[in-house]
Image (cartoon, grey):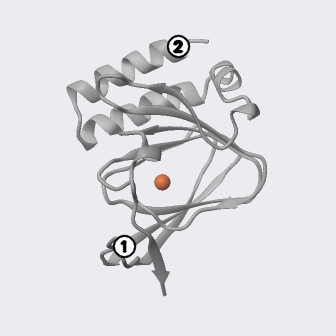
Amino acid sequence: MKMNLSQFATQCHRLIKSEPGPAGRAKLASLLQEVLLDSEFVNTYVDPSVGERTILHEDPELGFCILAHHYDDAKTSMPHDHAHSWAIYGQARGETEMRDYELISAASADQPGKVRHTRTYTLSPGMAHVYNEGDLHSPKRVLSTSLIRIEGTNMAKVKRFKYEPVS
Ligand SMILES: [Fe+2]
């Protein structure tokens, strides 16, 4: 293993701290690609027993999280953003068909927002994609998949609005 989890987390911390905006996240995505291409890293930290969401590391100072995800079967999510936060999706095994959307009308606590599909692309093993604040997307997984994701903050603790696609 070229870099273990602790070394990876330390490098993520340095990058986010020195460049907290989108430019730093692009560098973070490149770093994530390095570990995605290291089969020893993937096999060690993304064993299928991690299930659909396991936090591998939560940074005590900056709050970002490194997560492992494994889906045995097909799984499709609704369009969403990550509220005030951001996320980087890293494909470890299998493929994710990702859809991006533009915002048509804003969401609120009472009413879902409306979004329009803009493009579809595939995330293959070794690829990492940044979703900055407000970037709307929906992942579709047809077969078994594994991912390593980095969230700007632990999204399990964040209330999110819903969005509906319109044609
Ligand atoms: Fe997402």
Residue at 28% from the left image edge and 34% from the top image edge:
24
User: CA separation, marks 2 and 1?
Assistant: 37 Å
In this rendering, the answer to whether 165 lies above or below 85 is below
Residue drawn at x 52%, y 26% is: 34
Quadrant in the rendering for residue 21: top left
Q: In which quarter of the image is residue 91?
A: top right
Residue closest to the eye, 52 or 159: 159
Residue 62, above or below 29: above
Q: Is residue 99 above or below residue 40?
A: below
Label 2 sits on residue: 3
Would residue 8 be found to the left or right of residue 41 on screen? left
Mark 1 or mark 2, which is nearer the start of the sequence? 2
Residue type, label 2: Met
For label 1, the crowd category at 10 Å Cα-Cα, with few meaning under 14, some 14 to 19 and many 20 or more, is some
Location of mark 1 (residue)? 102
- Residue 84 rendering spot, x and y as whole percentages: 29, 52
Q: Position of residue 1 (x, y in %)?
A: 61, 12
**Which residue is more in the foreground, 50 or 26?**
50
Residue 146 lies left or right of residue 29; in this view the side is right
Asked which secondary structure carries label 1, the reply is: strand
Q: What residue is rendered at 24% in x and 25% in y? A: 17
Residue situated in front as seen by the camera: 109 or 113: 109
Tell me the crowding category of disc 2: few under 14, some 14 to 19, or many 20 or more residues within 10 angstroms, Cα based: some
Q: Which residue is drawn at 38% across and 24% down?
A: 59
Q: Are marks 2 and 1 in contact (CB under 8 Å)?
A: no
* Residue 87 - label: none
Q: Looking at the picture, how far across and down is residue 98, in whole percent? A: 55, 60
